[in-house]
Image (cartoon, rainbow, N blue to C red):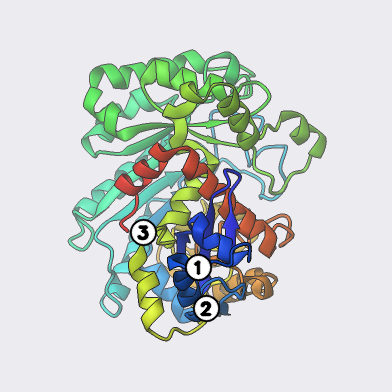
């Protein structure tokens, strides 16, 4: 099929072999039947047509149903283990997913995860590695909250345990997200053990008005002082291990966030919107929410040169990364193989972009419940960890996954975008309404148009992200 961008360029999408290539106007004239001359391009067009190019038929994808064995394999090879070390926080952010604006979580009890959970979990993992060896050279252990540093003893104990375990030593890195208030207290230990730290901050002081403590005080200056302390005392560590995360809302602006972090710290932060999952107060959510995509499009239209340095955080850049990882754009080798070899028009595929449980992380709540992901609330538990044992229902996890993606199966069956789909069946609040062949092809057209317009973005992705 032919995909046309807003810039007027045309591409052929041969979904049977995941081939995408530019279509010169000389060939397209024959596609639309506006040229009758029988020259070189006429012969080329008909040769390609005989080989199945320029057909509107879509490859049929055989949707894969995962099993409990698939889930167990992912668990034992998970790249990241996340411990919710406490459910208490020293801030009371108004938009927090565990706050009053949301209802898809249990009551917070200011609990701390017992240190014994560390040995119990890794005893299970390393014992099973004897039967199914892990293929991971590196495992990330992350600490989640609440504010993780409020249970620093658990964090310290974990590092000591890993250092004393022959199967883990040397293959683990550490990370956590923090509001930054306690960083000065534990800084030397964190630097010594090379922690990757994501600091939550929404920009300048006015932008942090929703980030107050339990007495209603904005603690911006204390957090900023801790950040400056890290940069001054450990400049190289600050450069490589410290990053920022901001939330876009009605008290800040996208440009204000970007300019603040870039001018103050030489960093480009991660930026997210208020989560739309589990909202209790729709009116308050509607007042506070701002669209990252709409703000960026507006800024890019008004000052494209000034915004070019922030291209790597744009929605279209991220979509383009996913797209180019799975699509051999202008890569002729696969297309030539298609010309000379019979190819099946059916390919086994997972429905949507929903992660197989534990393929990205294992999330363990402070009460020991093991869940598929922290983004889907507290209701989906598939196992439990305690001081001496771990119990996981791999079959239940597979059933939850298969059920969540079943509503999409018919659409995924012929979708041209399945390889770089970003729809999560567990968090998609539209329940599949976003999916259609037209919207999927339209997204491909937008990505191609973006890459045509910003050739530097294409070069950055090619050089740093993908191997064609």
Which badge, 2 or 3, comes first in the chain's sequence?
Answer: 2
Residue of label 1: 356
Q: Earlier in the sequence, mark 1 or mark 3?
A: 3
Residue 414 is left or right of residue 186, and the answer is right
Residue 432 to residue 213: above or below:
below
In screen coordinates, is 215 left or right of 257?
A: right
Q: Which mark is residue 66?
A: 2
- Report the residue at 25% width, 38% height from top: 194
Residue 405 image position (x, y, % from top left): 63, 70
> In this rendering, does residue 435 appear at all?
no
Dot 1: few (<14), some (14–19), or many (≥20) neighbours within 10 Å?
A: some
Q: Residues within 10 Å of mark 2 (few under 14, many from 20)?
A: some
Of the two numbered discs 2 and 1 on the same chain, state the one appearing first in sequence: 2
Q: Residue at x 64, y 37 (%)?
A: 274
Residue 60: x and y in percent read 58, 79
Q: Quadrant of residue 315?
A: top right
What residue does disc 3 label?
Answer: 79
Q: Are marks 2 and 1 in contact (CB under 8 Å)?
A: yes
Q: Residue 366 in the image: state x and y as whole percent.
A: 51, 51
Quarter holding the C terminus is bottom left
Return the residue found at the far right: 283
Separation of disc 2 and disc 1 at Cα? Answer: 8 Å
For the residues bearing labels 1 and 3, Cβ distance under 8 angstroms: no
| Label 1, label 3: how far apart the Cα atoms are | 13 Å
């Amino acid at each position: 099929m032919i995909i046309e961008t807003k810039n007027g360029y045309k591409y052929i999408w041969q979904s049977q072999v995941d081939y995408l290539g530019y279509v010169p106007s000389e060939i397209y004239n024959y596609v639309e039947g506006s040229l009758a001359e029988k020259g070189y391009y006429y012969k080329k067009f008909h040769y390609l047509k005989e080989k199945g190019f320029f057909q509107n038929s879509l490859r049929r994808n055989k949707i894969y149903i995962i099993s409990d064995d698939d889930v167990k394999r992912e668990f034992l090879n998970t790249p990241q283990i996340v411990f919710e070390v406490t459910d208490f926080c020293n801030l009371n952010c108004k938009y927090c997913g565990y706050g009053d604006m949301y209802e898809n979580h249990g009551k917070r009890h200011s609990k701390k995860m017992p240190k014994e959970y560390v040995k119990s979990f890794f005893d299970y993992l390393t014992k099973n590695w004897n039967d199914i060896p892990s293929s991971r050279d590196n495992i990330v252990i992350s600490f989640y909250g609440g504010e993780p540093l409020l249970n620093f003893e658990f964090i310290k104990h974990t590092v000591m345990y890993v250092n004393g375990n022959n199967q883990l030593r040397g293959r683990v890195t550490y990370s956590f997200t923090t509001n930054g208030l306690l960083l000065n207290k534990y800084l030397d230990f964190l630097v010594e053990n090379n922690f990757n730290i994501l600091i939550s901050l929404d920009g300048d002081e006015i932008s942090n008005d929703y980030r107050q403590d339990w007495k209603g005080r904005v603690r911006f200056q204390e957090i900023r002082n801790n950040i400056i302390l890290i940069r001054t005392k450990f400049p190289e560590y600050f450069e490589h291990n410290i990053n920022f995360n901001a939330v876009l809302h009605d008290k800040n602006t996208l440009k204000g966030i970007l300019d603040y972090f870039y001018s103050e710290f030489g960093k480009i932060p991660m930026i997210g919107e208020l989560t739309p999952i589990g909202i209790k107060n729709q009116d308050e959510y509607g007042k506070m929410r701002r669209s990252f995509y709409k703000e960026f499009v507006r800024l890019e239209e008004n000052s494209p040169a000034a915004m070019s340095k922030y291209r790597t955080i744009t929605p279209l850049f991220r979509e383009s990364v996913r797209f180019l990882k799975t699509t051999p754009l202008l890569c002729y080798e696969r297309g030539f193989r298609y010309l000379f070899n019979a190819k099946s028009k059916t390919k086994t595929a997972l429905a949507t972009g929903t992660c197989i449980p534990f393929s990205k992380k294992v999330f363990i709540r402070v009460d020991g419940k093991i869940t598929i992901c922290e983004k889907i609330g507290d209701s989906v538990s598939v196992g439990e960890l305690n001081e001496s044992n771990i119990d996981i229902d791999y079959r239940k996890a597979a059933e939850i996954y298969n059920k969540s993606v079943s509503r999409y199966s018919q659409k995924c069956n012929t979708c041209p975008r399945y390889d770089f789909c970003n729809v999560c069946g567990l968090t998609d609040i539209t329940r599949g309404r976003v999916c259609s062949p037209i919207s999927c092809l339209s997204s491909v057209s937008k990505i191609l148009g973006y890459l045509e317009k910003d050739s530097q973005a294409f070069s950055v992705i090619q050089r740093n992200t993908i191997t064609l």
